[in-house]
Image: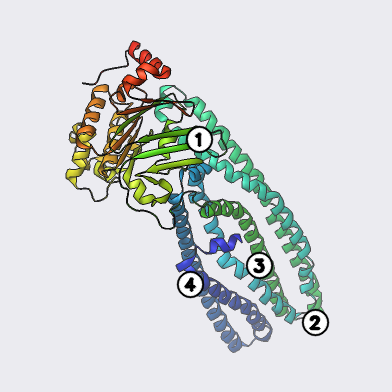
């Protein structure tokens, strides 16, 4: 089942996967013929001194060796090409499916786990695929042809080898049984190792600020030691395979040489036939060794393949309906008795009911963990509500095409993420056909043009990975500009002004009001100054709506709003917008 699922990714490289075994089979057949001619060379040429016969057989042996080499090289090339293509398709399929994931699907896999699966795990499976297309055919073909040839020479000697099969089989099964759980654990530990590295690299500034280098080194060393110790335990078990195979192989050779020599003395075999027999025994035992290596490689890859298939078979929780609506009438938003929870966790949003008219500016305020972000993520269907209905433009959001809905709802998340490239390329995530003038206009509206214009290259200035060459406030403004490019019907700002000063924030709000009058603006903020002028303010507390109204109404009637206002006013955090 696992192999059948992965085989779907071979696709256009199927021809290479077919040609490689054909080349290998031809190489094996020629390799089996060589000992036969060697026996004739010794018995009918060397022993009787017939030089003409020796030259004739020698030429045939040379041709067989060259042809065998050519088939072997072609088999290797085809196997490598097919395996590389298979791995490429596998990565594309995994990446494509990951792009279809909803947030809830992504939550099932850690970022480090997905990176490990799409890199190291696929490399492991690629190596197994290449070995399968060669060894899976080479080993049994060699075994069959060499065994037939050996029995043709002498019907008794090959039974020495047959008697070793139960020993080899039992040893291999025991090794697999012990090693497989350890390899599964190793792959999980690599996920953990990648997580530690990613956290450290992403948070390197925090690490250095708090002088936590030693602690981070210790944490990494502990995980690295776990990977090493588990890998050593697994490899120690696997390493038993070679001594077992060598013991059986050399024992067979000694026994066959001893018995065969007696047959030669009694004239039951010729010297050439004995040499051929030893060659065939070597080929048979080498094919068994290859088989055992292949089985062990597949055992190691089984864990990796299972993790890959988990991603390939993961079905997105949120998909388009059968006949999706592609036009959003306006930017109105309505929540009707909505509950939401992440997985099986406690609900973080309960009984949310309210309505926002198109074009309104709505402020959302509340303590950390009160459900603000969870609420707005339901609007573009980043998650689906567990109960109740979310409406956009007068329709249930589940009726819309995901592409149409998300293009109409621009969202600036709490975590500002920029991508390696240029400022313009990052801006055009919001609209790939946006002109330079539209990019500049969005930057001005988001109060980002002042610092972008000062950069060498302007909108073509480079952006490093994660936007590390910009400050927190600059990244926030660039992300807001990116959201504006698409000219959305609904704009959601999730605490996206926390890193800018109040004057800049006020300028941004004025720009929104002047240039985006028809766009519904939902602003999540910690500062009351950020939402004071909103048409409606929603106060959240512990996953529930605690109050709805204007600044004046809430200041007069809502205890939570009053407390936040007083604490910010007394603490000097509240500034009237100018």
Q: Earlier in the sequence, mark 4 or mark 3?
A: 4
* Residue where numbered disc 1 is placed: 196
Label 2–label 1 contact, CB within 8 A: no
Residue 296 x %, y %? 64, 56
Considering depth in this image, is 242 or 129 the residue closer to the camera? 129
* Of marks 4 and 3, the one in the foreground: 4
Find disc 3 in the rendering and name its residue: 287
**Quadrant assignment, res 54:** bottom right
Residue underneath mark 4:
15
Marks 3/2 in contact by CB < 8 Å: the verdict is no
Discs 3/2, front: 3
310, 55: nearer the viewer: 310
Question: Whole-Å distance between the Cαs marked 3 and 1?
Answer: 42 Å
> Where is 403 relative to 16, above or below?
above
**Label drawn at residue 20:** none
| Residue at x-position 55% and y-position 54% | 309
Q: Residue at x 61, y 58 (%)?
A: 298
């Amino acid at each position: 089942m696992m192999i059948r699922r992965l085989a779907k990714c071979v696709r256009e490289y199927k021809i290479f996967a077919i040609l490689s075994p054909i080349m290998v089979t031809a190489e094996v057949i020629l390799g089996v013929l060589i000992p036969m001619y060697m026996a004739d060379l010794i018995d009918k040429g060397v022993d009787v001194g017939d030089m003409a016969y020796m030259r004739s057989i020698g030429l045939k042996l040379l041709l067989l060796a060259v042809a065998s080499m050519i088939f072997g090289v072609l088999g290797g090339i085809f196997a490598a090409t097919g395996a590389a293509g298979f791995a490429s398709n596998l990565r594309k399929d995994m990446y494509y499916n990951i792009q279809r994931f909803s947030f809830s699907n992504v939550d099932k896999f850690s970022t480090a786990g997905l990176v490990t699966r799409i890199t190291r795990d696929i490399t492991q499976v690629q190596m197994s695929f290449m070995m399968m297309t060669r060894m899976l055919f080479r080993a049994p073909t060699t075994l069959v042809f060499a065994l037939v040839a050996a029995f043709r020479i002498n019907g008794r000697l090959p039974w020495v080898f047959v008697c070793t099969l139960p020993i080899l089989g039992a040893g291999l099964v025991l090794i697999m049984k012990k090693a497989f759980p350890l390899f599964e654990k190793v792959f999980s530990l690599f996920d953990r190792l990648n997580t530690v590295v990613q956290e450290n690299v992403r948070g390197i500034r925090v690490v250095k600020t708090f002088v936590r280098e030693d602690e981070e080194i210790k944490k990494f060393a502990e995980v690295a030691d776990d990977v090493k110790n588990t890998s050593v335990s697994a490899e120690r078990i696997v390493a038993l395979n070679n001594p077992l195979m060598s013991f059986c192989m050399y024992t067979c050779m000694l026994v066959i040489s001893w018995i065969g020599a007696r047959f030669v003395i009694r004239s039951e075999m010729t010297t050439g036939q004995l040499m051929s027999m030893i060659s065939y025994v070597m080929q048979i035992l080498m094919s068994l060794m290859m088989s055992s290596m292949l089985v062990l490689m597949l055992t190691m890859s089984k864990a990796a393949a299972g993790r890959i298939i988990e991603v390939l078979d993961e079905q997105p929780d949120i998909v388009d309906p059968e006949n999706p609506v592609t036009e959003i009438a306006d930017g109105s938003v309505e929540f009707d008795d909505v509950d939401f929870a992440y997985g099986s966790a406690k609900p973080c949003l309960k009984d949310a009911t309210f309505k926002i008219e198109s074009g309104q500016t709505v402020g959302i305020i509340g303590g950390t963990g009160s459900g603000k972000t969870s609420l707005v993520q339901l609007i573009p269907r980043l998650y689906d509500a567990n109960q109740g209905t979310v409406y956009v433009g007068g329709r249930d959001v589940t009726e819309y095409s995901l592409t149409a809905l998300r293009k109409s709802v621009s969202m600036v998340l709490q975590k500002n993420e920029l991508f390696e490239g240029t400022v313009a390329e990052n801006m055009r995530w919001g609209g790939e056909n946006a002109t330079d003038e539209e990019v500049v206009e969005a930057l001005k509206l988001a109060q980002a043009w002042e610092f972008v214009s000062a950069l060498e290259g302007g909108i073509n200035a480079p952006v490093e990975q994660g936007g590390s060459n910009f400050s927190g406030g600059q990244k926030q403004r660039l992300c807001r500009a990116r959201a504006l490019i698409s000219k959305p019907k609904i704009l959601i700002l999730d605490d996206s002004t926390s890193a800018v000063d109040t004057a800049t924030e006020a300028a941004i709000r004025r720009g929104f009001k002047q240039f985006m009058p028809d766009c519904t603006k939902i602003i999540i903020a910690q500062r009351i100054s950020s939402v004071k002028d909103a048409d409606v303010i929603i106060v959240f507390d512990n996953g529930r709506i605690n109050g709805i109204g204007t600044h004046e109404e809430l200041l007069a009637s809502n205890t939570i709003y009053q407390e936040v206002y007083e604490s910010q006013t007394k603490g000097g955090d509240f500034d009237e917008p100018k």
